[in-house]
Image (tube, helix red, strand yellow):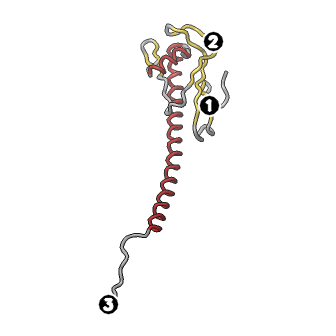
Amino acid sequence: MDLKRQTQQGFTLIELLVVVAIIGLLSSAILVGMGNARIRARDARRLSDVQQVKSGLDVHYNVASGYPSTADWNTAQSASAFLTCSGQNTVKPPQDPTAAQVYAYTQGGNSTTGCATTVYSDYKLEFTTEGATTIGPAGVYYLSPRGITTTPPF
């Protein structure tokens, strides 16, 4: 009697389950890492936006002898337009990388007339970071003519 041994072709159910479990663990680790990278990227954009706003507000101050009012800022921000003075674009309020947060601008200090509108001697721009950055841990920060701080300038 000639008995031939059958060879097994394919994988057992246990082998397939082990492979699926390993792939699941690897993909979840990758997704967690990508989430942190996204947070860092959004915060980097926020810091870049804040530096551009500071430069633009400095230009506005030089042209108009003051900083824009909160109302003018909000109008420009909602229209995604530049603030202008004497026909010169000075600053464009940025949009936050996430819809959940905004750059909150507030006028401050003394008021005067400049550029056919009321301008102010001070401002603060409130923004929030999601993770640790070069300026500190995640949290609320304020930009003013004196720089970035964790406490409101006024």
Q: Amino acid at mark 2?
A: Asn
**Image mark for residue 11:** none
Give the alpha-carbon distance from disc 1 to disc 2, as whole Å: 23 Å
Q: Residues within 10 Å of mark 1 (few under 14, many from 20)?
A: some
Between circles 1 and 2, the one closer to the viewer is 1
Q: Quadrant of residue 8?
A: bottom left
Q: Which quarter of the rendering shows the C terminus?
A: top right
Name the foreground residue: 15 vs 124.
15
Name the foreground residue: 102 vs 21.
21
Q: Name the N-terminal-most of marks 3 and 2.
A: 3
Between circles 3 and 1, the one closer to the viewer is 3
The residue where tag 3 is placed is 2
**Image mark for residue 110:** 2
Between circles 3 and 2, the one closer to the viewer is 3
Q: Amino acid at mark 1?
A: Tyr
Residue at 58% across, 32% down:
128
